[in-house]
Amino acid sequence: MNDFARNADDDRDLLRCYAEAGAEAENAFRRLVEKYSGLVYGTAMRRLANPEWASDATQNVFAALAAKAPELVRADIPAVGAWLHRAATLESIRVQRDQLRAQQRQALIREELSSV
């Protein structure tokens, strides 16, 4: 078995341990966060170019992983890292869209207030 396959199996084992809420659940999740936080944060930073937004996106992705762990274990996802990368990309797009909308609303409010 090559290193990639071994790492993917280890990651799935950690996810399964967390999903089953065993005695080592918190430790298993912490290990996944430690291993992949750089990947998730880096993905978010590339799209958002804002450390605060990227940090928020990173937290949201790991919260989603925690919530969806049982479902992901049942689906037997082939690679936790790939799922996290995709989730980080999608979450970054959502954060970017939400921030743009907020900026547009603020501009409208400023415009309305200046015309009064």
Image (tube, rainbow, N blue to C red):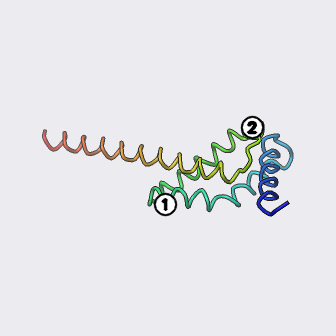
In the picture, the disc for residue 75 is 2
Give how far across and how far down residue 112 sits, in percent.
19, 39
Q: Mark 1 or mark 2: name the one nearer the start of the chain.
A: 1
Question: Residue placed at 36% from the left, 46% from the top?
Answer: 100
In the picture, the disc for residue 69 is none
Give how far across and how far down residue 2 sits, in percent.
82, 62
Question: Residue placed at 57% from the left, 58% from the top?
Answer: 41
Quadrant showing the C terminus: top left
Q: Work out whether 108 lies above or below 55.
A: above
Left or right: where 68 falls relative to 55? right
Q: Amino acid at mark 1?
A: Arg
Left or right: where 91 falls relative to 112? right
Give how far across and how far down residue 92 sits, in percent.
50, 50
Question: Residue placed at 71% from the left, 50% from the top?
Answer: 80
Marks 1/2 in contact by CB < 8 Å: the verdict is: no
Q: Amino acid at mark 2?
A: Ala
Give how far across and how far down residue 88 sits, in percent.
57, 50
Left or right: where 1 falls relative to 43? right
Question: Residue placed at 53% from the left, 46% from the top?
Answer: 91
Q: Which residue is mark 1?
A: 46
Kind of element beneath mark 1: helix
Quadrant showing the N terminus: bottom right
Q: CA distance from mark 1 to mark 2?
A: 29 Å
Q: Work out whether 39 lies above or below 92.
A: below
